Image (tube, rainbow, N blue to C red):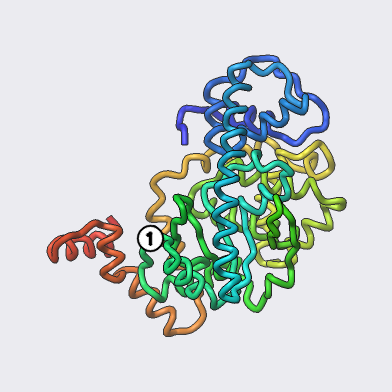
Amino acid sequence: MIKNYELKDLKQAIYLSSIRNTPLQIMNPVSDEVVALCNDNGLSAWCYSRYKDDLLRGLDPAVVSQWKSIYFLNTISYQRYLVVFNKVNQLLRQAGIPLLVLKGMALASSLYGDDGLRPMGDIDVLVPDGMGLKALDILLKSGAKQLFVPRSSYHEQADAHVRAVSIDGIMVEVHQRLFALGSNFHTSRVDFFKHRVVVLKQNTQMQMLNDVWMGYHLIAHAIKGIEMGGLRLGWLLDIAVLINAQKDYKTYIDSILSVRPKMKNAMLSVVNMAALLLPEHDLYNGIDIDLNCEKIFPLLNNDGHEKVHRWINLHHHIRTPGLTNKAHLLFYEFFPCREYMLFRYQASSKAGLLYAYLKRITGR
């Protein structure tokens, strides 16, 4: 993330990428800081599409050219992601494991209507709870390369997804549930395959969450990011585009909030942030623009939050069902398995390993 922008830059970036039906005339040149802010937050291709549709006017040709390049790079990259998705889909289905596509791949393939508008960093798929490790084993045996090492087998079983792998140079995360067992947003006993829609994209049939569950996942994922100390404006755009696609947005938002009533205030806070990007209808008019921009601004730099991550992990472990599970998770949080320590701290000797454990315990 860039670190030299100001609050006014954030407001202009939001203004440029907002979902408006009337043309926006840019009176002053868009600054380098705003361009970088849009690039870093995944908004550039979307802004280019607004320009192409004559909804952004007066942009510097150099800015248009840069954003156009990003749009075409996204379009080309999507084809690579689609090939890998088809490979994962085929391997798991042959083994009798159904899957839903999540987040970026799902959004780029459906909601945005143009696969160049939504950049992706990986492929996220969801398999039925209890099938994550089996799916991982199938992918590894088929040539996938392991990218990470879990702190322990207990952590991997309790987490939202199993360890990430790389297939043809693209990272794939197999989710066994939407959120970790100890997360405030985990929904037990929900069969997400009964809340799915099917989309046909370039002769590829994709199953994904319906709009209510997709909205819940996106909003809760943004809250998780905020808790970890970071936020991407692209996440807010995802939510805004999804809300804007609904005929009755108030009923739609109420349906999402009803999934986890105890987290209503946190979810509404994210909805209000996303509403900054929405057209000027009732939802937009009911929020404090300055207040929400001030909430977003400090979250754009997500560096140096390792200690926050540790406390969140501990909170999740304490909330995980079962005393035995809690005990194992808490123990391995401070004393991870040897393979993890070698991977995480690059310790190559007994002395180095002991020092690494000391750093782990003290949180340094």
Q: Residue at x 75, y 66 (%)?
A: 258
User: Would residue 198 be found to the left or right of residue 129 on screen?
Assistant: right
Tell me the quarter of the picture where residue 207 sits. bottom right
Viewer-side residue, 179 vs 209: 209
Q: Is residue 296 above or below residue 338?
A: above
Query: Which image quarter holds the C terminus?
Result: bottom left
Report whether residue 273 is seen.
no
Viewer-side residue, 271 vs 289: 271
Query: How far across and down, in percent of the image, does residue 185 sit?
Result: 60, 66
Q: Residue at x 76, y 49 (%)?
A: 243
Q: Name the amino acid type tagged 1.
A: Phe
Q: Residue at x 46, y 56 (%)?
A: 167
Viewer-side residue, 162 vs 76: 76
Q: Is residue 25 above or below residue 174?
A: above
User: Would residue 262 be found to the left or right of residue 359 on screen?
Assistant: right
Q: Residue at x 39, y 61 (%)?
A: 146
Report whether residue 222 is seen.
yes
Categorize mark 1 by other alpha carbons within 10 Å: few (<14), some (14-19), many (20+): some
Tell me the quarter of the picture where residue 257 sits. bottom right
Q: Is residue 24 above or below residue 150?
A: above
Q: How many marks?
A: 1
Viewer-side residue, 284 vs 159: 159
Query: How far across and down, in percent of the image, does residue 357 sit?
Result: 23, 65
Tell me the residue that label 1 is attached to. 148
* Label 1: which secondary element: loop
Query: How far across and down, in percent of the image, does residue 18 sit?
Result: 72, 34
User: Would residue 46 be found to the left or right of residue 80 on screen?
Assistant: right
User: Would residue 210 be found to the left or right of residue 309 on screen?
Assistant: right
Tell me the quarter of the picture where residue 233 sits. top right
